[in-house]
């Protein structure tokens, strides 16, 4: 298609072959490159994974979206200092030499997230489960004892 403007003929480029993101590196080499930053390690591959952490009166509850990650490839640990650590790896599928990739955006590689827990957690009663790519970790808390308060009546006389 030609556009005529002011007596001059303009031939636009073939926009159907133009790739506006062509200058960005994909996840295919386990590395992310971002404009204006240095190369990040593969531990950051899942930096955009979504984690929810809520604390109730009874427990800490952490949920993570880990699509494509098998439960065997995830470790949930409480490390020294009361830090909950979730780490693992999404492994790359075997590449077929007969395939020609057009787009490869799904990340693969290692990931690590840490969450500082309060001192009153019951680590020995912690439970984790994984269903449909969602990891759920529940760490119960000890009941916080309220201090025993005794009211003292104030009189109008000197002691």
Image: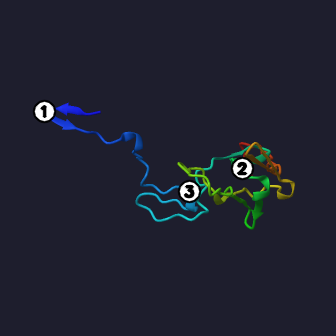
Question: Residue at 58% of width from left, 61% of height from top?
Answer: 30
Look at the image and tell me in which quarter the N terminus lies: top left
Circle 3 sits in a helix, a strand or a loop, which is it? helix
Q: Is residue 40 left or right of residue 138?
A: left
Residue at far front of view: 98
Q: Is residue 13 above or below residue 24?
A: above
Which label number is shown at residue 33? Answer: none
The nearer-to-camera label among 1 and 3 is 1
Question: Residue at 65% of width from left, 57% of height from top?
Answer: 95
Q: Is residue 150 left or right of residue 101?
A: right
Q: Is residue 102 left or right of residue 111?
A: left
The nearer-to-camera label among 2 and 3 is 3
How far apart marks 2 and 3 lie (CA) works out to 79 Å
- The residue that label 3 is drawn on is 27
Q: Is any part of residue 78 visible from this angle?
A: yes
Circle 1 sits in a helix, a strand or a loop, which is it? loop
Q: Is residue 16 above or below residue 117?
A: above
- The residue that label 2 is drawn on is 158
- The residue that label 1 is drawn on is 7
The numbered mark, 1 or 3, whose residue comes first in the sequence reads: 1
Residue at far left of view: 7
Q: Position of residue 14 (x, y in %)?
A: 35, 41
Question: Residue at 43% of width from left, 49% of height from top?
Answer: 21
Q: Position of residue 91 (x, y in %)?
A: 69, 58
Mark 1 touches mark 3? (CB < 8 Å): no
The numbered mark, 2 or 3, whose residue comes first in the sequence reads: 3
Q: Is residue 109 above or below residue 48?
A: below
The numbered mark, 1 or 2, whose residue comes first in the sequence reads: 1
Residue at far bottom of view: 80
Q: Position of residue 84 (x, y in %)?
A: 73, 58
């Amino acid at each position: 298609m030609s556009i005529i403007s002011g007596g001059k003929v303009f031939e636009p480029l073939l926009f159907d072959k133009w790739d506006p993101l062509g200058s960005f590196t994909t996840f295919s080499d386990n590395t992310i490159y971002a404009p204006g930053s240095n190369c990040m390690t593969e531990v950051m591959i899942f930096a955009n994974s979504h984690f929810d952490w809520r604390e109730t009166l009874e427990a800490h509850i952490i949920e993570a979206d880990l699509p494509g990650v098998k439960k065997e490839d995830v470790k949930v640990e409480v490390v020294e200092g009361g830090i909950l650590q979730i780490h693992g790896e999404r492994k790359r599928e075997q590449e077929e030499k007969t395939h020609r990739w057009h787009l490869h955006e799904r990340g693969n590689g290692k990931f690590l997230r840490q969450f500082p827990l309060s001192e009153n957690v019951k680590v020995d009663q912690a439970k984790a489960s994984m269903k449909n790519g969602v990891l759920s970790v529940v760490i119960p808390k000890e009941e916080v004892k309220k201090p025993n308060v005794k009211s003292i009546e104030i009189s109008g006389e000197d002691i």
